[in-house]
Image: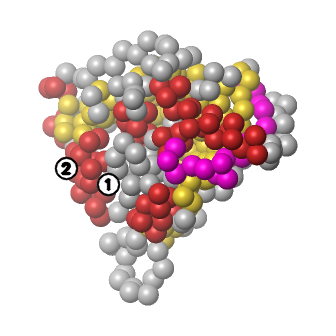
Amino acid sequence: MRRKGMKVGAITMAAVMGSVLAGCGDDSEQTGAKDGASSHANRSDGGHDQGTTAVRAAYDKTAEAESARMTIRMKLAAEGESVTSEGQGILDLAEGDSVMTITAQGKSLEQRVVDEVLYQKTPGRNAPGGKPWVRIDLDKVAAQQGVNNQQIGDPAQTASYAKAITDEDVTKVGTEKIDGVNTTHYRVSVDVTKLPGGDQMREQLGPTLPMQVWLDDEGRLRRQQMDMTVKVAASASATPDAGAAPQQLKMSSVMQFSDFGTEVDAEAPPAEQVADMTDKALQQSQQS
């Protein structure tokens, strides 16, 4: 089962935004039907059954392509402020290696993932020791956050939640073209308590994990959208208040895949050009 690649791809983008947690909630502007999409949901029993089968199989069918070009747009909003990041590049769906360019707040950085290690280089900005690249061990970050192969944080994880998806959890929205490709649009809702770490996820996300997926005629993911509200503990630097309600962080992400089978050439930077920032990333995560 080639699941590592897509898991790493998701953790990578989450790490860029300072969080390994990903989930979803309500619809965003991407939700509406476009390019002649049908707005009629198929609510027949047969439609539900076919949709459930398609969604459950989508992850493996996408991974079978071995690689793809990927774009992602992620927005974080809290306390009246928001940050939007956009990324584009190539992802190895089997191994998780990738080469991407990430842009956020008007600044761009070069990013590579090789053997589940994240490397980032920001033009004009050096890491400690004057080194141009920083290194973060994604395995260690994921372990601290309690993330594993079966948990949230995977952009194509909708079908790997198969054991938690029933016919009532999948609704066909309609058909739609994405970059000229015919797709079928589904809404999926997963009972988080049926997932590993579900009790903690329920506290942060609520009882369900809703998302939207667009599958092409070969059953592969062309787009996945997640919109969520996460409850997070108050900042350690804030004035203590035992009665304070948890803060809310709104996260929205839209990821698209195209050009399946494209070549991926991801190599780690020379060791002498890299500063290891894993420990600092873990400390920041604990304080957030």
Mark 1 residue type: Gly
On screen, residue 15 above or below 200 = above
| Residue carrying label 2 | 279
- Between 247 and 257, the one lying in front of the other is 257
On screen, residue 67 above or below 189 = above
On screen, residue 213 above or below 80 = above
| Residue carrying label 1 | 146
Residue 44: in sight, yes or no? yes
Where in the figure is residue 209, as x and y percent of width and height? 56, 55
- Between 22 and 63, the one lying in front of the other is 63
Please identify the quarter of the rendering in which residue 253 is found.
top right
What residue do we see at 52% from left, 22% from top?
69
What residue do we see at 56% from left, 16% from top?
259
Where in the figure is residue 163, as x and y percent of width and height? 49, 47
Mark 2 residue type: Asp
> Which residues are drawn in magenta?
162-178
Callout 1–callout 2 Cβ contact below 8 Å: no
Whether the magenta-drawn stretch holds residue 199 is answered as: no
Whether the magenta-drawn stretch holds residue 177 is answered as: yes
Where in the figure is residue 280, as x and y percent of width and height? 22, 51
- Between 184 and 139, the one lying in front of the other is 184
> For the residue labelled by badge 1, is the local secondary structure a helix, a strand or a loop?
loop
Q: Quadrant of the C terminus?
A: bottom left
